[in-house]
Image (cartoon, grey):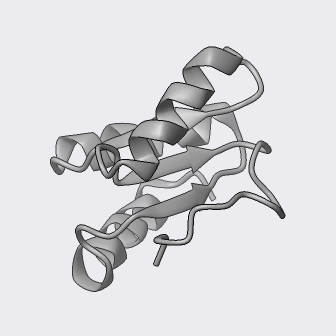
Amino acid sequence: MDKGSIRAQLLDSYQKLAKGKKGIIYSISRKHSDHICQEFKEAGISIVRIDSETPRSERRLYVQRFKDGLIDIIVNVDIFSEGFDCPDIE
């Protein structure tokens, strides 16, 4: 999954189908999420990574900024599953 061609398709799909919309990307590892973040940031998209090593206060801040529309994408590594509430995710 952590191949340049697959990440390029992910970015291309976002830009074509969901640009400017909020979303959560589920990645397979921290390294994978770093690669995704790097490519999306280079494309000018506001994106952050959240994983088990992200301090709780930082997670809360990112989630609040995401809900406030200041962050477009959260890349999630085994943190969000059922029960994450953000009604305006499309």
Residue 30 x, y percent position in the rendering: 65, 32
Percent position of residue 88, x then y: 46, 71
Of 33 and 67, the residue lying toward us:
67
Viewer-closest of 68 and 73? 68
* Quadrant of residue 47 within the rendered picture: top left
In this rendering, would 29 be left or right of 48? right
Visible residue check, residue 70: yes
Residue 46, picture quadrant: top left
Q: Which residue is drawn at 50% across and 27% down?
A: 61
- Looking at the image, which residue is at 49% across and 70% down? 89
Q: Which of 9 and 13 lies nearest the eye of the viewer?
A: 13
Nearest to the observer: residue 51 or residue 62: 62
Looking at the image, the residue that sits furthest to the right is 82
- Residue 4 vs 16, above or below: the answer is above
Q: Is residue 13 shown above or below 61?
A: below
* Up/down of 17 relative to 79, above or below: below
- Residue at 50 percent across and 48 percent down: it is 74
Expressed as whole percent of the image width and height from the top left, the position of residue 29 reads 70, 40
How many numbered callouts? 0
Rendered location of residue 1, percent (x, y): 63, 59
Choose top left, top right, bottom left or bottom right for residue 41: top left
Residue 48 seen in the current view? no
Q: Which residue lies furthest to the left in this view?
A: 44
Q: Residue furthest bottom?
A: 17
Identify the residue at horizontal 72%, vertical 49% (top origin): 28
